[in-house]
Amino acid sequence: MRPAALLVAALLAAAPLGAQRDTSAAAPRPAAPSLAGASLVEGRVVRPAVTGEVPVPGVWVTIHRVGPDSAGPLDSMRTDAAGRYHFTYRRFGDATALYFAASVYNGIAYFSTPFRGGAVRGDDAEIVVFDTTTSPVRFTVQGHHLVIGAPRPTGLRDIVEVYEVSNDTVVTAIGRDSLTPVWSAPLPKGATGFTAGQGDVSASSLQRRGDSVVLLAPFSPGVKQLSFTYSLDQRAFPIDFTLDKQIGLLEVLLEEPGAQVRSPSLRSQGNATTQGRTFKRFLAQNPPAGERVRIDVPSTAFAARSTLVTALIVGIVVVMVIALWIAYRRGRVFRPSATRTPVEESVATLASAIAALDARHEANDPSLSSADYDAERAALKARLAAKLAGGASPA
């Protein structure tokens, strides 16, 4: 039967209570609660066998309470020769608290379903335990769900994967040691930020190992849900994978309108909206082993190129504005030159220009030939003479 909430697993590490009751040689007490307002539970611990279920005598069973106000064991006892146990207990505190029984068999904890009502008997109080094996067991993927988010501003896309995996045997799979996984699944190359999510196993037991996610916890018969998240950048797409076995259901959710998934069995189911986000939904029932799935997303290269082009254009415009401003400023400042006539020339300016030209000639400036010197000096003298005469400078 399916385990109770995993948050109670840590409670099982506690030793049986001091007020232990060993009833392995006696039958359970009558069904009537011994205290007014008390609750009752009567159940069995059983183990599957070829002939059906067989009782498990002499194992400890502990009744637990888990609530928002407090949590802990309430009482414990050993099962009798028929695998039976019973408790009379009083409910207290927060009304939403859960009460259930648990037993440890071959080092693995197993749970009853949460108790409903004041008197619980029969199947509702049954705890099924299993033998263990380190040999490979048959796992079936009943469901595989992939959620591909839209890119964040960093360009990374958040990916969520959820598996529903079934142990179809009657034994609990355990690793040969603490480092040996009992189940694994592939991760896309380039995945970053791996984080185990909520599910039926503790987050610490679901880990990344290279390009795989591995489960390092016992896996009892039945179905367990496992989930994890990671991020991918544009270079990781398209994602291609091949189903190594037939699975019950494959679901792909794509947040980007331009994203695509291709597979012979996947069919569009329209849009699905959750938490204000809209996804394109694709579903495949019983896709066969060997089927290839390809997931692609819109390229972010165009947006990157557009940003780069915009930046270049802005840079060019800025440089042009600066150049024009410098040219404008230079046009407003007079610089003596033998080849350029200022808008307004004074006698002192022309005389200084002639003196500077003579100094260059006397210093044998290689850039000033004798012919140029004579021509420029004559032009400056003419403009100076005109200025002294009060007329316009000759062109």
Image (spheres, rainbow, N blue to C red):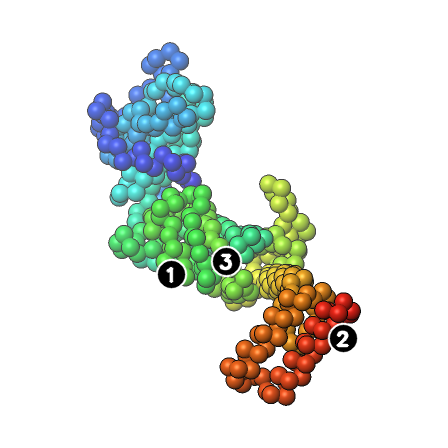
Tag 3: residue type? Leu
Residue that numbered label 2 is attached to: 394
Residue 254 occupies quadrant: bottom right
Disc 1 and disc 2 in contact, CB within 8 angstroms: no
Q: Nearer the viewer, mark 2 or mark 3?
A: 2
Which residue occupies the extreme right position in the image? Answer: 391
In the image, residue 306 sits, relative to residue 9, either above or below, namely below
Give the residue drawn at x 68%, y 65%. 346
Give the residue drawn at x 42%, y 40%. 2
Residue 210's disc is 1
> 205 left or right of 362?
left
Q: Nearer the viewer, mark 1 or mark 3?
A: 3
**Which residue occupies the foreground of this view, 385 or 302?**
385
> 150 left or right of 56?
right
Residue 378's disc is none
What is the crowding at mark 1: few (fewer than 14 residues within 10 Å), some, or many (at least 20)? few
Tag 2: residue type? Pro
In the image, residue 220 sits, relative to residue 180, either above or below, namely above
Q: Position of residue 80 (x, y in %)?
A: 26, 31
Instruction: Tell me which numbered mark, 1 or 2, is placed earlier along the sequence.
Output: 1
Residue that numbered label 3 is attached to: 232
Tag 1: residue type? Gly
Q: How many marks?
A: 3
Disc 2 and disc 3 in contact, CB within 8 angstroms: no
Q: Position of residue 192 (x, y in %)?
A: 44, 56
**Which residue occupies the foreground of this view, 311 or 203?**
311
Residue 299 occupies quadrant: bottom right
Q: Circle 3 sits in a helix, a strand or a loop, which is it?
A: strand
Give the residue drawn at x 52%, y 52%. 158
